[in-house]
């Protein structure tokens, strides 16, 4: 049910699903596709499907419970995080666009320089042709990226509507006790998996769960949840007194 949704944190490529008749279902796993193609690009790491299942289900249960118990607070926190994340993302896109435009201008100067060097016989016609083709190819590739970046910056999406739709659907589903392909397909956009790390001899592996329309959801810690729950119950007792 997770095929096509699992990505490598290090190289950004998808993780391939692997299971054969010789394996038990519990041994099925996802591995980094980049490493199989080119071992220099990424590392040989994997994560078992049952681990992803467990982590996604637990996260989804916590998220859904937060939505249903603390809907307003949940929405406020997500919008606060979204505002900061969106600002950083837009700043990064603007820097990328400026860098591309600067490089395009630099290439124009480089092409002019090698043309002048060719005319003055400082470089041969063959070298001029090689350099000019290389620069022109790079420039064309950079120019092709500009419309997409400009369109993204000019049509910044509003998360409010997506968040409202997400909350409404979560309230219909209530508390999931198991994952189904339909549930995963409806709510999960992608799952980003890190390479394993070792601490005191134990293997640790992090994943990021991106929900459709809202991205990574920042939910309350157990301590925050308990604090808010007790405050909520105290308020209810005051009203009923």
Image: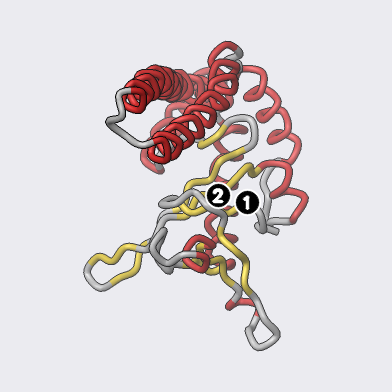
Question: Marks 2 and 1, how far apart in space?
Answer: 6 Å
Most extreme residue toward the left, as rendered?
Answer: 200
Q: Is residue 42 above or below residue 111?
A: below
Residue hosting label 2: 191
**Point 22% across, 69% down: residue:** 200
Q: Which mark is residue 5?
A: 1
Residue 99, image x, y percentages: 38, 22
Few, some or many C-alpha atoms within 10 Å of disc 1 (few <14, some 14-19, many ≥20)? some
Q: Which mark is residue 190?
A: none
Question: Can residue 192 be seen from the camera position used here?
Answer: yes
Few, some or many C-alpha atoms within 10 Å of disc 2 (few <14, some 14-19, many ≥20)? many
Residue 170, image x, y percentages: 69, 36
Q: Quadrant of residue 201?
A: bottom left
Q: Along the line of sight, which residue is nearer the eye, 183 or 44? A: 44
Q: Along the line of sight, which residue is nearer the eye, 83 or 77? A: 83
Q: Is residue 13 above or below residue 125?
A: below
Residue 166, image x, y percentages: 67, 30
Asked if labels 1 and 2 touch by Cβ distance under 8 angstroms, the answer is yes
**Point 38% across, 39% down: residue:** 127
Most extreme residue toward the bottom, as rendered?
Answer: 22
Taking the image as shown, residue 117 lies to the left or right of residue 188, namely left
Taking the image as shown, residue 194 lies to the left or right of residue 153, namely left
**Point 40% across, 43% down: residue:** 222
Q: Quadrant of residue 177?
A: bottom right
Q: Is residue 96 above or below residue 201?
A: above
Most extreme residue toward the top, as rendered?
Answer: 154
């Amino acid at each position: 049910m997770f095929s096509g949704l699992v990505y490598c944190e290090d190289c950004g490529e998808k993780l391939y699903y692997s299971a054969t008749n010789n394996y038990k279902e519990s041994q099925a796993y996802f591995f980094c596709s980049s490493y199989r193609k080119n071992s220099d690009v990424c590392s040989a790491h994997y994560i078992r499907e049952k681990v992803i299942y467990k982590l996604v289900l637990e996260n989804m249960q916590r998220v859904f419970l937060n939505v249903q118990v603390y809907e307003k607070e949940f929405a406020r926190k997500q919008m606060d995080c979204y505002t900061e994340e969106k600002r950083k993302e837009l700043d990064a896109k603007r820097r990328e666009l400026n860098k591309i435009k600067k490089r395009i201008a630099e290439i124009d100067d480089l092409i002019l320089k090698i043309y002048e060097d060719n005319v003055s016989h400082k470089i041969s016609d063959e070298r001029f042709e090689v350099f000019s083709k290389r620069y022109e190819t790079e420039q064309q590739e950079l120019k092709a990226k500009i419309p997409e970046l400009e369109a993204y910056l000019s049509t910044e999406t509003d998360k409010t509507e997506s968040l409202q739709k997400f909350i409404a659907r979560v309230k219909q589903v209530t508390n999931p006790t198991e994952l189904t392909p339909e549930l995963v397909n409806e709510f999960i956009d992608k799952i980003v998996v890190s390479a394993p790390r070792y601490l005191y001899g134990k293997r640790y592996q992090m994943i990021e769960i991106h929900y459709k329309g809202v991205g990574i959801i920042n939910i309350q810690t157990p301590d925050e949840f308990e604090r808010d729950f007790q405050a909520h119950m105290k308020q209810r007792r005051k009203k009923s007194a």
